[in-house]
Image: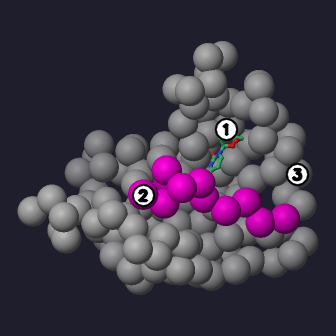
Amino acid sequence: MSPEELIRLAREAMTHAYAPYSHYQVGAALLCADGTVYQGCNIENATYTPTVCAERTAFFKAVYDGKRAFTAIAVCGGKDGALTGFFPPCGVCRQVMREFCGDDFIIYLDGGPEGWQKKTLAELLPGGFQAEKYMR
Ligand code: THU
């Protein structure tokens, strides 16, 4: 699947966002190693803390369905859904990616009019806590 197609699916996912508090709508499209794609959006909460990000929604949907191997994720977002720049994954989402993905996992950042950037998990989470190093 092309980066452009994965980004298109992230943008579609963004329209599902439930963000009545921050008004930041975020979408993610997660490409599994078997070629399937899981979409996610942010889902906010009136007490704030239970809010879940778009990236984790996509990962948790996929993991629930038995997926464990992932190739790439595309992420986009902006105030009221306006794509005015890059919307990089938060630290918690990077750590969730690390649970299932290696250094070469690809993260496409959709910058709207600024185009898109390709990052790796190694770039976005250097020195992260890895289960295979510390927990097994
Ligand atoms: N958000 C995401 O969905 N993904 C991120 O990686 C960063 C933040 C959401 C959470 C909240 O609903 C809104 O963006 C503002 O923080």
Residue 18, given in percent of the width and then of the height, sits at 68, 30
Q: Are marks 3 and 2 in contact (CB under 8 Å)?
A: no
Between the C-alphas of marks 3 and 1, the distance is: 14 Å
Q: Is mark 3 within 8 Å of ligand 1?
A: no
The answer to whether residue 133 is above or below residue 131 is below
The residue that mark 3 highlights is 82
The crowd level at tag 3 (other Cα within 10 Å; few <14, some 14-19, many 20+) is few
Label 3: element kind: loop
Q: Quadrant of ligand 1?
A: top right
The answer to whether residue 117 is above or below residue 111 is below
The crowd level at tag 2 (other Cα within 10 Å; few <14, some 14-19, many 20+) is some
For the record, the magenta segment spans 85-95
Q: Which mark is residue 136?
A: none
Between the C-alphas of marks 1 and 2, the distance is: 24 Å
Q: Nearer the viewer, residue 19 or 31?
A: 19
Name the residue type under label 1.
His
Q: In which quadrant is the C terminus drawn? A: bottom left
Q: Are marks 3 and 1 in contact (CB under 8 Å)?
A: no
The residue that mark 1 highlights is 16
Q: Which mark is residue 95?
A: 2
Residue 106 appears in the figure: no
Does the segment drawn in magenta span residue 27? no
